[in-house]
Image (spheres, helix red, strand yellow):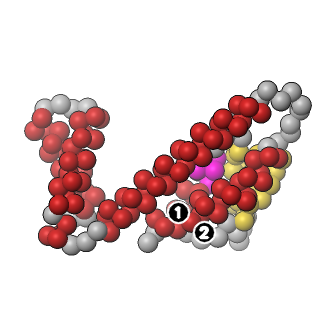
Amino acid sequence: MTPFIFNIFLAVVWTALTGRLDLGNFALGFALGAVALALSRGLWGGTAYFQRAGRVAALLGWSLLEFIAAGFLEALRAFDWRRREAVETEIPIGLKRDGQIALFSSLVSLSPSSLVVGIDRERGLLLLETTPWRAGVLAARIAPMLERQIRGLSR
């Protein structure tokens, strides 16, 4: 049994023992199970579970901050009365696995004013429709950082 599955099992046991079936109580049981696993990591061998959990938390935190910043900037640009047309652009990506590409394109599509339209046949370019200002930010800053974090999840 993997540590993650065992952690879920501990959360279910906690929920059953306390008699409260709600998401908050399950999350508390999951957190207590994670603490128990961390304290007993010598018995089941290793810290890879916690390293991966840390990388997932870092990706989620970074994505949340990017979504907030993009939403704020998009709200400010809403007051600009000039007409802005959406542009089609291509962002080079170095990810090759299906799951990595799906996660990357999902996170890019979740951000305001960008929509992933497709991926080229060689899987080297992500085709998207976005505003001109967002295309530059995505290609220069967000895409490389997002790729690095997604690659880190595979280790």
Q: Is residue 118 visible?
A: no
Q: Position of residue 36 (x, y in %)?
A: 17, 55
The residue indicated by pointer 1 is 150
C-beta proximity under 8 Å, tags 1 and 2: yes
User: Does residue 23 appear left or right of residue 103 in this picture?
Assistant: left
* Label 1 secondary element: helix
* Residue occupied by mark 2: 95
Give amino acid for label 2: Leu
Q: Badge 1 local density, few (<14 within 10 Å), some, or many (20+)?
A: many
Q: Residue 57: in sight, yes or no? A: yes
Q: Relative to 77, is 61 on the left or the right?
A: left
Q: Nearer the viewer, residue 52 or 65?
A: 65
**Mark earlier in primary sequence (1, 2):** 2
Q: What is the residue that sits farthest to the right in this orientation?
A: 82
Residue placed at 29% from the left, 35% from the top?
Answer: 23
Numbered range of the magenta stretch: 105-110
What is the quadrant of the C terminus in the image?
Answer: bottom left
Task: From this view, report whether residue 15 is shown above or below residue 56.
Answer: above
Locate residue 92, reporting x and y percent. Answer: 72, 65
Residue located at (39% from left, 59% from top)? 54
Main SS of residues in magenta: helix
In the image, what residue type sits under mark 1? Ile
Residue 72: x and y, percent? 66, 35
* 10 Å crowding of disc 2: few (<14), some (14-19), many (20+): some
Q: Residue drawn 74% across and 31% down?
A: 76
Determine the secondary structure under disc 2.
Answer: loop
Q: CA distance from mark 1 to mark 2?
A: 9 Å
Decide which of 59, 117 is in the foreground and name it: 59
Residue 72 left/right relative to 1: right
Q: Residue at the left extreme? A: 17
